[in-house]
Amino acid sequence: MISFLTSLKKIGFSWMIKYLPFHAYKYPFNHTSINHCFHYFQFFIPSVILGFTLLLFFCEIKMDLDLSPKLAKKVYGDDAGSYYAWCPDELPMLRQGNIGAAKLALEKNGFALPLYSDSSKVAYVLQGAGVAGIILPESEEKVIAIKKGDAIALPFGVITWWYNKEDTELVVLFMGDTSKGHKPGQFTDFFLTGANGIFTGFTTDFVKRAWDVDDDTATALIGNQKGKGIVKLDANFKMPEPKPDHRKGMALNCEEAPLDTDIKNAGNVVLLNTKNLPLVGQVGMGADLVRLEGNAMCSPGFSCDSALQVTYIVKGSGRLQVVGVDGKRVLETFVKAGNLLIVPRFFVVSKIADPDGLSWFSIITTPNPMFTHLAGSIGAWKAISPEVLQAAFKVPAETEKLFRSKRTNDAIFFPPPK
């Protein structure tokens, strides 16, 4: 009995021994100790089996995460505008990948109050035009004009505000890293003003002393702004005018930037990295804007540097397939504008556009992303020896030659079949 208990200790089950009846292991081996141990293991063994069963069950759940695309849900807002977010309870990969995603929609004269966040982000203007105020830590305010197609890197600690003076709704997408945030998979914003701003949390005497103001001023600072998050300004109110020189190094218009890849009648891509927007290095993420022509296809490929792809469908619609571990197709779905989805690390993804085309904006959780494409003129299969391919596929040499001879001119994007 003693040697059995000693063995349990050696293999790390000392936690189990401490629950044995005291005299079952302290006193010499006898019928009483056998009785106690028998009753103990009669309870313990079924419990262990149940525990391992539950563990396997939850592991299976984890492996079968829902990857289907989701739409954002409204968090707050009124006639001045609204704030929407994707919930990690509905899109579990957000929590698992420590990624947050949200949208800000401002109506005419809508003003998103100054705030800072617990996460670094990339902002992308989906629609409209407006003005953004950006204050980097220990830096002066940058006031920049923004328009559809603009990508803006927002590192930790940056304070931002957003304003729309145009008739068209201004819509801005935010995607970023929540690994250092309060809630995995969600942004937590801290407003400087408004009904839920930091001023409302401090007592009047703290405000008076910190900002060296009198009672009336302190009371006004704390209580005058009744709006929460987004407010509507008077049409005659003058906001700061954007300065052209402030835009340099702060934003890149992905719709006007030089194309990194452009395939006639198929599609094109613009990469956002430290070369064309150095600030993304501080954010720790890269991004791309991909536009597929009608009925064109994007080559099956994967991120080869252990990065997650978080994709928002900007325009159009199409079909998407994702293949994961053991050659299992983990997602086959239809995507449309407004959908958000996440492709896990090293999973292979491919898309085919509908006749109206398909465009998407993605962030990749590395500032200088790298991809391996499996089809096309630069596909990984082209680099593998013919003999290896023949053996790997277990096909005749003629079949391997036919396979290799295809897609010799098309890279990444493939035009519609003729």
Image: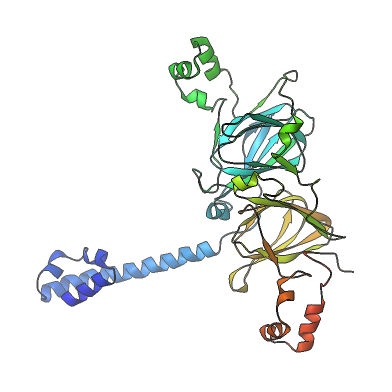
Give the quarter of the figure containing the C terminus: bottom right
Task: Judge by depth and name the residue closer to the eye, 51 or 377.
Answer: 377
Q: Residue at the location (57% across, 17% down)?
A: 224
Q: Can you tell which quarter of the image residue 370 is in?
A: bottom right
Asked if 17 appears above or below 31 in the picture, the reply is above
Q: Determine the residue positioned at 80% across, 50% down.
A: 258
Q: Is residue 105 left or right of residue 292?
A: left
Residue 131 appears in the rendering: no
Could you say which is closer to the camera, residue 388 or residue 318?
388
Residue at image position (22%, 69%) is 40
Residue 110: percent from left, percent from top: 70, 28
278 w.r.t. 18: above or below: above
Counting from the top left corner in percent of width and height, residue 1 is at 17, 76
Q: Is residue 213 above or below residue 356?
A: above
Can you give x and y, in whole percent of width and height, for residue 403 in the image? 78, 79
Q: Report which quarter residue 371 is drawn in.
A: bottom right
Looking at the image, residue 216 sits to the left or right of residue 316; the answer is: left
- How many labels were placed on the picture? 0
Which of these two is toward me, 414 or 313? 414
Work out which residue is located at the far right of the displayed protein and give it: 418
Residue found 25% across the figure and 72% down from its top: 10
**Image: 174 above or below 113:** below
User: Image quadrant of residue 188?
Assistant: top right
Image x and y of residue 43, in percent: 27, 68
Q: Look at the image and tell me whether residue 67 can be seen.
A: yes
Q: How is the image coloured?
A: rainbow
